[in-house]
Amino acid sequence: MSSGVEVDQSVLEAFDEIKLKKRHAYVVMMIKDNKKIVVERLGDKLPQNCSQNKNEEIFNEMKKAFGAEPRYILFDFCFNRANQSVAQKLAFITWCCDDCAIGKKMIYASSKDALKKRFTGLNIEFQCTDVSEFQHSELIKDLMHKDRI
């Protein structure tokens, strides 16, 4: 199902900047006026040798900006693998809490696939609908489970 919502060029540019150039720790996107997916906020560059704890701080700070409002997020996760090496993985997150208005849920759900198709080579995705699953630690557990060394 398609919502007819456009993807703004700035979203594609931000994707290239985070995926290829590593200029941002995250990109937060929103649907503006039910017409266009736009960049709402860009995170600073990840610190050199980013630790999992620092990455969690960045994640939690990012979440404060939009609270319970639905968003699409590209987040560059840093985590410790089972063999103690540090990994960095870019993930696409859809955040739409269960308490959100049904109209917002519908437009975010129906626009997600069109947006995701524009993110070439991105194969890690999380869909969060509850605060308990929209936690850095929970997403890291899932990432570690999916990770291939």
Image: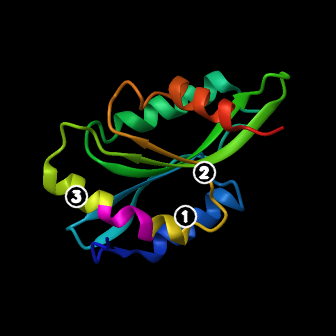
Q: Residue flagged by tag 3: what amino acid is it?
A: Met
Residue that carries the numbered disc 3 in the rendered image: 106
Labels 3 and 1: the sequence-earlier one: 1
Query: Marks 1 and 3: in contact by CB < 8 Å?
Result: no
Labels 2 and 1: the sequence-earlier one: 1
The quarter in which the C terminus is drawn is top right
Give the vertical position of 128 relative to 31 (above or below). Answer: above
Query: Marks 2 and 3: in contact by CB < 8 Å?
Result: no
The label number, if any, that marks residue 14 in the structure image: 1
Mark 3 residue crowding within 10 angstroms, few (<14) / some (14–19) / many (20+): few
Is residue 111 in the magenta section? yes
Label 1, secondary structure: give it. Answer: helix
Give the vertical position of 28 relative to 113 (above or below). Answer: above
Residue that carries the numbered disc 2 in the rendered image: 24
Q: Which residues are magenta?
A: 110-114
The quarter in which the N terminus is drawn is bottom left
Query: Marks 1 and 2: in contact by CB < 8 Å?
Result: yes
Total marks shown come to 3
Q: Nearer the viewer, residue 83 or 46?
A: 83
Residue drawn at x 23%, y 52% is 105
Q: Residue flagged by tag 1: what amino acid is it?
A: Ala
